[in-house]
Amino acid sequence: MTRERRTSRRYQIVDSNHGKGGFGKVSKERDLFLERFVAVKTIHMTEDKEEREAFEQEARTLARLCHPNIPAIYDVLFAEQSMRIVFEFIGGLPLRDLIENDSLPYVREVCRWFEQIASALEHAHGLGIIHRDVKPENIIITPDQSSAYLVDFGIAVNPETLDQAVESEYILGTEGYMSPEQQDGDAVDISTDLYSLGLTLYETLAGELPELDDYRPLSADSDAVPPALDELIQRCTKEDRRFRMRTAREFRQALRGAFRTDLPFSTLLTGSRLFELLVALEELTAEEFHCKPRGQKLLIFNRLRDLIRTNKVTLERPTAKLIANLVRLASLEPAVDFTPIVGAGFLWGFDKTFGKAVGNKMVRQALIDTCKTATAEAHGVLCERFLTFVDVYVLASKPLWYAHDLRHCVTALLANPHCSDAADELADVYDELNQRTRVR
């Protein structure tokens, strides 16, 4: 009995075609002993001794990696003609799916993911490991979109295999993401991964790969994108690697420095780009915002109205971020100012289309959080807008998340200490939403 047969009962296949990677396919399986999901990469091997040794070396390379944004390797199982590598299972979606569904959040959250991926590469590079296949398919975003994981080191090289990789007759990588040296079959280095990372960052923000010979700046299409990101991408994608960004740490530092936070508030309102205003608003509390001069607050409210009227595709998610910020910050303002913001919040949070996606989770969460803590006047505005909204829209045709998040809103409104006049009507809506979610 082989080791594979002795241990196969431990793992139960949940999804045999969960993904592909390197030289094998990936399945989602359940570890029956430890009661957890794992990802299992199966590699079919010939009887060639050198090939088997190469795969064993790959497993040892993966085992050296220990980083919070790289799935851990748990075990390696050998059979006569195959090898199974058991990994930590990462729930979520490949970045490719988010790009194709047009469901990405705004630019600063994308930068947070890429800072994590650059950190993973920095760790690998410190061990002499070059990934060689950085692309949207190999970046997994967790369901809450808080973390990104770099996966599939199947064609990675390390100091022990670098010479073999150069002498190989095969060019390994993915067309469209390979650096010039990869395409030419030359030796790779750290800058090879950074080249692919820069291309992937551009595609994530633009929805398509850049034309490097005729580069169109992302910041030219949207003032929610810092020009520093264009500079970063162009530094990564130089054809001559001598002029490229040299380390993943430098990449991380450039991402962090792309967002200025040291400008006076008056300058942010008159001479800055949208991304700088968003960063500044993120750092304020409702009390701090309330203390700003009324003229400054009116400039921000008018900017939001102008963005909503413009309805430019490249500014949709930054606009949603501004709405989410103001739902949180303007709760201490007069009802005449807060009411249109809350109205926009319900429309953009639940019904606004973003490419193939509907609604914005960030806006919905801001509404839910504000419903819990709103003052008496703000609570009245939220109740009125909420009841108007659920009166107008037919819930039966909506997806489950729709009624689920509306239920969170009404629960927060009912739990708020200021809930009195509208309590009975809210309770009726709460009961209806409960029935709908249970039926669904």
Image: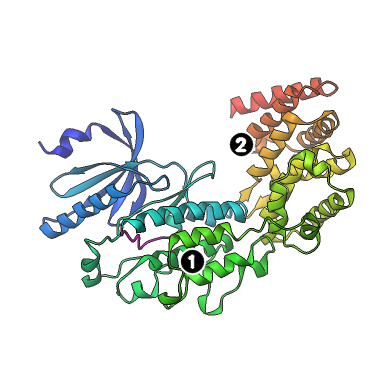
Q: Of helix, strand and loop, which one carries label 1? A: helix
In magenta segment, residue 132: yes
Residue at (28, 61) in percent of width and height: 157
Q: In this view, does 279 lie to the left or right of 133?
A: right
Q: Is residue 277 left or right of residue 73?
A: right
Q: How crowded is mark 1: few (under 14 residues within 10 Å), some or many (20 or more)?
A: many
In magenta segment, residue 402: no
Residue at (65, 43) in percent of width and height: 362
Q: What stretch is highlighted in magenta?
A: 128-134
Q: Quadrant of the N terminus?
A: top left
Q: Earlier in the sequence, mark 1 or mark 2?
A: 1
**Whole-percent x, y for residue 159 in the image:** 25, 62
Of residues 125 and 333, the one nearer the viewer is 125
Check residue 319 in the rendering and tell me which mark sits there, or answer none.
Answer: none
Q: Residue type at mark 1?
A: Leu
Residue at (22, 68) in percent of width and height: 163
Separation of residues labelled 1 and 2 (CA atoms):
33 Å
**Whole-percent x, y for residue 316 in the image:** 69, 55
Query: Which residue lies under the disc numbered 2?
Result: 401
Query: Which residue lies under the disc numbered 1?
Result: 199
**Whole-percent x, y for residue 45 in the image:** 18, 54
**Whole-percent x, y for residue 333 in the image:** 85, 40
Q: In which quarter of the image is the C terminus?
A: top right
Q: Of helix, strand and loop, which one carries label 2? A: helix
- Is residue 137 placed above or below 387 in the rendered structure? below
